[in-house]
Amino acid sequence: MIRYALRCHRSHDFESWFQSSAAYDQQVKRKLVTCPICGSAKVDKAIMAPRIVGKKGRGRATPPPEPTATMTAPEAAQSAPTSLLMAQERELRAKLKELRDHIVKNADNVGERFATEARAMHYGDKEHRPIYGEASPDEAKSLIDEGIEVSPLPTLPEDRN
């Protein structure tokens, strides 16, 4: 995962995480990266200093400060968008995890038989029930082309480790 400091064309600073630099480039090209303050899709990477942590300091990096009454207006303005984005990202991740956990708890895992099972239910060969499983991108596209509603199960970065 890569964290980029970003800036929109209206000079709003914010940050976001990406799977890779290529993922960032693809999302910007498709106008999926937008400013959380004004919604602008005209976003560029901002200048940022690398965070280097020595062996003794690993795992002890401190987050940016929350705005406080003792901060000057420019300091508060710089930390507020980042803090807001981090809070929104945490909330979104919690909701995605809740959704995924609900699906896993209440649906049958059919594994690699997902496309076959979904088709059988769609065409009336099997009784409808909630399912989840695995499908290749081609299989998923084929299901959608046939009018079968499917969507990916949310996966969070911490699930990949």
Image: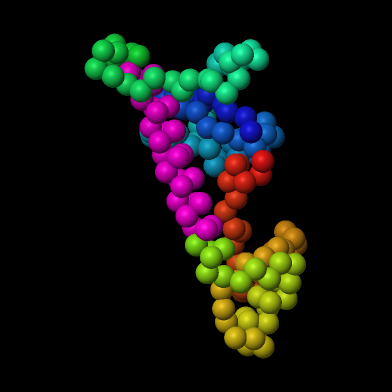
Residue that extends furthest to the front in the rendered view of this protein: 56
Secondary structure mostly taken by the magenta-highlighted segment of the chain: helix
Task: Please determine whether, in this image, residue 103 is positioned above or below residue 31.
Answer: below
- The x, y position of residue 63, in whole percent, is 46, 23
- The x, y position of residue 22, in whole percent, is 69, 34
Judge by depth and name the residue closer to the eye, 146 or 73: 73
Residue 91 appears in which quarter of the rendering?
A: top left
Magenta-colored span = 76-101
- Decide if residue 135 is on the left or right side of residue 98: right
- Decide if residue 134 is on the left or right side of residue 63: right
- The x, y position of residue 129, in whole percent, is 57, 78
Task: Please determine whether, in this image, residue 4 is positioned above or below residue 155.
Answer: above
Is residue 100 within the magenta segment?
yes
Residue that extends furthest to the left in the rendered view of this protein: 69
- Residue 2 seen from this side: yes
Residue at position x 57%, y 82% from top?
128
- Decide if residue 113 is on the left or right side of residue 86: right
Residue at position x 74%, y 60% from top?
136
- The x, y position of residue 17, in whole percent, is 56, 33
Residue at position x 54%, y 20% from top?
60
- Residue 149 seen from this side: no
Residue 145 appears in which quarter of the rendering?
A: bottom right
Residue that extends furthest to the bottom in the rendered view of this protein: 125
Task: Please determine whether, in this image, residue 35 is positioned above or below residue 77.
Answer: below
Indicate the quadrant containing the C terminus: top left, top right, bottom left or bottom right: top right
Is residue 96 within the magenta segment?
yes
Residue 37 appears in which quarter of the rendering?
A: top left
Judge by depth and name the residue closer to the eye, 129 or 47: 129
Judge by depth and name the residue closer to the eye, 13 or 97: 97
Task: Please determine whether, in this image, residue 84 is positioned above or below residue 45.
Answer: below
